[in-house]
Amino acid sequence: MDSPAIPSDADLMALAQDVATAAQERRVMVATAESCTGGWIAKTLTDLAGSSAWFEAGVVTYSYSAKESLLGVNPRTLERTGAVSEETVLEMVSGALARYGAGVAVAVTGIAGPSGGTPDKPVGTVWIGWKRRGGYARAELFHFSGDREAVRRQTVARALAGMTSELRG
């Protein structure tokens, strides 16, 4: 498993502050496209006072139709690879960046549990994608352990850390 340590609220806030600092330094807005985290990334970012200066938008898309209509994910991608796939998260992050006018975006899709896992995609399987305006989308696969909250906390932490790397990279 990728991370045995479950991030605390203080850990998540520190990671959000890193995103805020990097976004302000680069003078760019950020956007989030979330599935398995249910808006937790956006909530963590907007818990910071003054976030309206650098946070553009966040969208939560659990259903296929929401991913299609709000993020422009191709229905054929969802039919072929499913919601929890590299292809889908790359389309999610690209859609968020294009539709919401941000300079950098993050997208997450996964299986937080306790049910919904399959042999190919067990509970804890999460894809995270990042993209900077003018850059290429990148995605990473994680296999987190623990209960639903643990999987979601680890996802939020990795998403935020990757967003800071994207902003600074």
Image: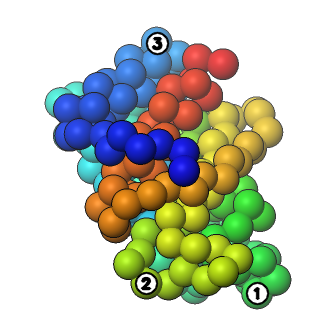
Image mark for residue 115? 2
Q: Nearer the viewer, mark 2 or mark 3?
A: 2
- Label 3 SS: helix
Image-quadrant location for residue 167: top right
Q: Residue at point 70% right, 76% down?
A: 120
Name which residue type carries label 1.
Glu
Horizontal relation, residue 161 to residue 9: left or right: right
Name which residue type carries label 3.
Glu
The x and y percentages for residue 20 are 37, 25
User: Foreground residue, 153 or 132?
Assistant: 153
Q: Nearer the viewer, mark 1 or mark 3?
A: 1
Horizontal relation, residue 162 to residue 55: left or right: right
> Does residue 86 sit above or below 73 in this rendering?
above
- Asked if the residue at tag 1 contacts the one at tag 2, i.e. Cβ–Cβ closer than 8 Å, the answer is no
**Residue position for label 3:** 25
> Does residue 7 sit above or below 82 in this rendering?
above
Q: Residue at point 34% right, 32% down?
A: 16
Can residue 61 be seen from the camera position used here? no
Q: Residue at point 46% right, 12% down?
A: 25
- Disc 3 residue crowd, few under 14, some 14–19, many 20+, Cα 10 Å: few
- Disc 1 residue crowd, few under 14, some 14–19, many 20+, Cα 10 Å: few
Badge 2 or badge 1: first in the primary sequence: 1
Image-quadrant location for residue 92: bottom right
Image mark for residue 79? 1
Name which residue type carries label 2.
Ser
Q: Colour mode? A: rainbow
- Asked if the residue at tag 3 contacts the one at tag 1, i.e. Cβ–Cβ closer than 8 Å, the answer is no
- Label 2 SS: loop
The x and y percentages for residue 53 are 33, 29
Image mark for residue 157? none
